[in-house]
Amino acid sequence: DAQLVRMGKDASAIIHSIDPDAQVLSPSYHVWTLSNFFDPYIAAGGAATFQIVNFHMRGNGPDNVTPESFLGTYASIEADLVKNKLNTMPLWDSEHGIKADESLPDLDEQAGYVAKEVALRAGVGLQRQYVYAWDDATSPVGLQGNEAGTAWDTIAGWLIGHSISPCTVTSGTVYTCNVDDGQIVWDSAQSCSTSSGCTTSNYTYPSQYTFQTNLYGTKTALSGKTVPIGYKPIFLTSK
């Protein structure tokens, strides 16, 4: 830790001698290394070496295939930052996404995974988040040119230039994220399969909404009082 802090101080000094306005990130720890890596680094004087707190906020082990586990990850990191008096610094997620050795074979499921990861992080107000990885050729890691990449673009269109409230469980396994012009909603209990398609449940949507848009950009009118929701988020809007 002492050596790493010294390296951080040297790097920060060199960078700021070239550009005084540059912002240096902390080392990119994971939530499961808070106590044995991040905290000792801060205790050794590491907070003086960065201006932005940087974590890889993917889930720990099997939790990584469950996007909703991010909320627990984020809560643990926030509590630790409060403990270390770093909670006023900007916080970035510099890596999240599915890994090549994790089972997520269905293309619709990959699209839903990406969309939920993005919405959950936007909801807590992370200033930046980076997916791993856009142009990786290893399935299901890479997003470029497939359904997951389309979903990334679609949900970015729902969020950029808008405000979003934290995603919360509103009933059972139904998650909603209120945006200033609509609502993102999904049911975490549902699933997608290449052999049987995607399962759904019926969601009683707020009466002000009249349209739904799916992750591939298809917009359709709502009818009745309920709408089918599944693993893949949809976006409800009034126009």
Image: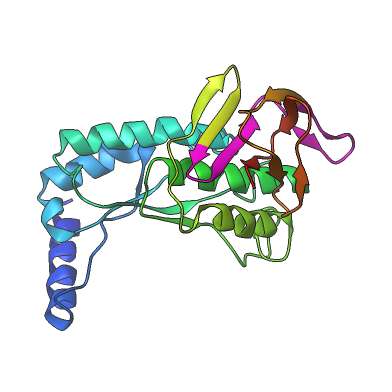
Q: Is residue 178 visible?
A: yes
Residue at 21%, 50% (x, y): give it: 89
How did the renderer colour the structure?
Answer: rainbow
Image quarter for residue 85? top left
Residue at 40%, 35% (x, y): give it: 73
In-image side of 60 versus 171 (left or right): left
| Residue positioned most to the right | 195
In-image side of 230 versus 117 (left or right): right
Question: Residue 121: image x %, image y %?
Answer: 45, 44
Please name whichever residue, 139 or 52, is drawn nearer the observer in this view of the structure: 52
Residue at 52%, 44% (x, y): give it: 119
The answer to whether 200 is drawn above or below residue 90 in the figure is above
The answer to whether 53 is drawn above or below residue 22 in the figure is above
Whether residue 139 is in magenta: the answer is: no
Question: Residue 228: image x %, image y %?
Answer: 76, 30
Image quarter for residue 32? top left
- Which stretch did the figure color magenta? 178-200
Whether residue 198 is in magenta: the answer is: yes
The answer to whether 107 is drawn above or below residue 14 in the figure is above
Question: Residue 174: image x %, image y %?
Answer: 60, 25
In-image side of 24 versus 96 (left or right): left
Question: Residue 18: image x %, image y %?
Answer: 16, 83
Please name whichever residue, 3 or 142, is drawn nearer the observer in this view of the structure: 142
How many marks can you see? 0
Residue at 53%, 57% (x, y): give it: 132
| Residue positioned most to the bottom | 18
Q: Is residue 105 visible?
A: no
